[in-house]
Amino acid sequence: MYDIIVVGGGPAGLSSAIYGGRRMLKTLVLAKNIGGQAAIAKNVENYPGIDSITGLDLVLKMKEQAEKFGAEIKFEEVVGIEKKDDKIIVKTNTAKYETKAAILSFGLTPRDLGVPGEKEYIGKGVSYCATCDAPFFKNKTVAVIGGGNSAIDAALVMSKIATKVYLVHRRDGFRAEDALVCQLRETKNIEPVLNSVAKEVKGGDFVEKLVVADVNDENKIRDLKVDGVFIEVGLLPKTEWVKDFLKIDENGQIAKDKKCATSVEGVFAAGDVSDAAYKQIIIAAGEGATAALAAHQYILKLAGKSIAESAPFDWGRCATTPKEKPNLY
Amino acid sequence: MELNEKKFNKEVLECEKPVLVDFWAPWCGPCKMLLPIIEDLEKDYKGKDIKIFKVNIDENPQIATKFHIMSIPTILIFEKGKVKKQLVGLQTKEALKKVIDKII
């Protein structure tokens, strides 16, 4: 039986694991991978105290820190959660774990386009990561789909490598940051294709064209001859599997209170998967800490200890590792 | 274990056992997220009927071109010198184990 099971290995989850470990709580992190969206960030320059670091290096440091404080990390995908009396049962594809408290911090997942040809051509021209795959499209023509920061960033990255970049967006303007839109205007080999939606990816063995339609007139079709299609249409919280277990808000995010408590006692939520107002690494990390402290308080309450004993400060921990620790709770 | 072009033929194409190769590059975030999972698999399948390798495509671009890799991370599973399975993008450890267990 664990004290805390954290679902998700991004900044929120790892921060929960650090705080859990420091409170001498037996903590397990179940994650598909380490870092989630943060790991893909090229450069993080707004995390206080750190001048500049790649997203991956930052989350790997968090992972090391969590392990140093005794948290266990397993690469397993969580598929179910339920509560029986005071026991929370977390199911993965391969195992079942029991815990006193759970922290859900599994972040956001890139959205699919959902058009014919998309899945068939993954790895054959369709890509979800411009920084990863840009070098494969040297001197070729590509289309980037989307209108947010990540889409424009992808178009700018591709413009330096590809001969021509179409930027396909369903609105009549971009909702990205001004600085990016400004760079976009200055880049000659990017052609914005506005008021247009992607309909189909076509080709032979590899991608040959992207079919787009006018948003106002479905019959106005245009074939863009491209070798690659980069999909950057935003992120979404994958919360279907918990929707019958706890309260989800109208945007599909997990609803929580100011102590990160969800509608189920003993289950907490933190970071991008929750209704956090801003999706930022520092905020996710802060929420992870809040959730772990609240979980600690909840565990003390379960054990019948007075809540006053759990001061809202983090005093660190003694030298014993959680494996050696006496049964405190 | 990291492979280069020189060793690729012998270690992968001429290998009797099935071989899993993870194609990655240092500039690719999801690739780096996959590396610890691959390392975990190397440990889990040590002594079993599969060999597991990594190929840095930045240093070995010819191999990537030869197998038409256009997106990384890509995992190819070879059997008797032929590609039996291609997995593109970040994978979970469980998904990879399922694929490997089916083959060996």
Image (cartoon, coloured by chain):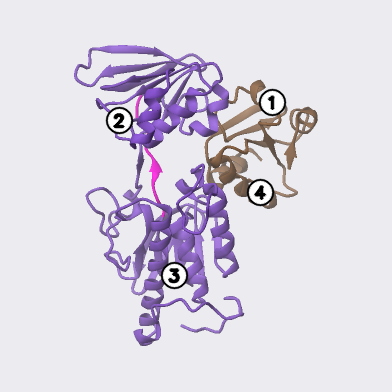
Kind of residue sitting beneath label 1: Ile
Question: Can residue A171 be seen from the camera position used here?
Answer: yes
- Which chain does purple denote in the image? A
- Per the rendering, the mark at residue B39 is 4
The residue indicated by pointer 1 is B63
Please identify, in this view, whether the residue under mark 4 or under mark 3 is nearer the observer: 4
Kind of residue sitting beneath label 4: Glu
Q: CA distance from mark 2 to mark 3?
A: 45 Å
Kind of residue sitting beneath label 2: Phe
Q: CA distance from mark 4 to mark 3?
A: 28 Å
Q: Quadrant of residue A213?
A: top left
Q: In percent of the image, x 49 and y 65: which residue is there?
A: A17
Please tell me if label 4 and label 1 are on a single chain. Answer: yes
Question: Can residue A113 be seen from the camera position used here?
Answer: no
Give x and y (percent) for residue A34.
53, 52
Q: In percent of the image, x 74 and y 32: which residue is there?
A: B12
Give x and y (percent) for residue A86.
36, 74
Secondary structure under tag 4 reads helix
Are there few (<14), some (14-19), or many (20+) residues within 10 Å of tag 4? some
Q: CA distance from mark 2 to mark 1?
A: 39 Å
The residue indicated by pointer 3 is A99
Disc 2, disc 1: CB below 8 Å?
no
Letter of the chain that mark 3 sits on in the rendering? A
The residue indicated by pointer 2 is A174
Q: What's drawn in magenta, residue-wise?
A: A106-115
Q: Is residue A22 above or below residue A191?
A: below
Please tell me if label 4 and label 3 are on a single chain. Answer: no
Q: Looking at the image, which is closer to me, A324 or A152?
A: A152
Q: In percent of the image, x 57 and y 26: which residue is there?
A: A135
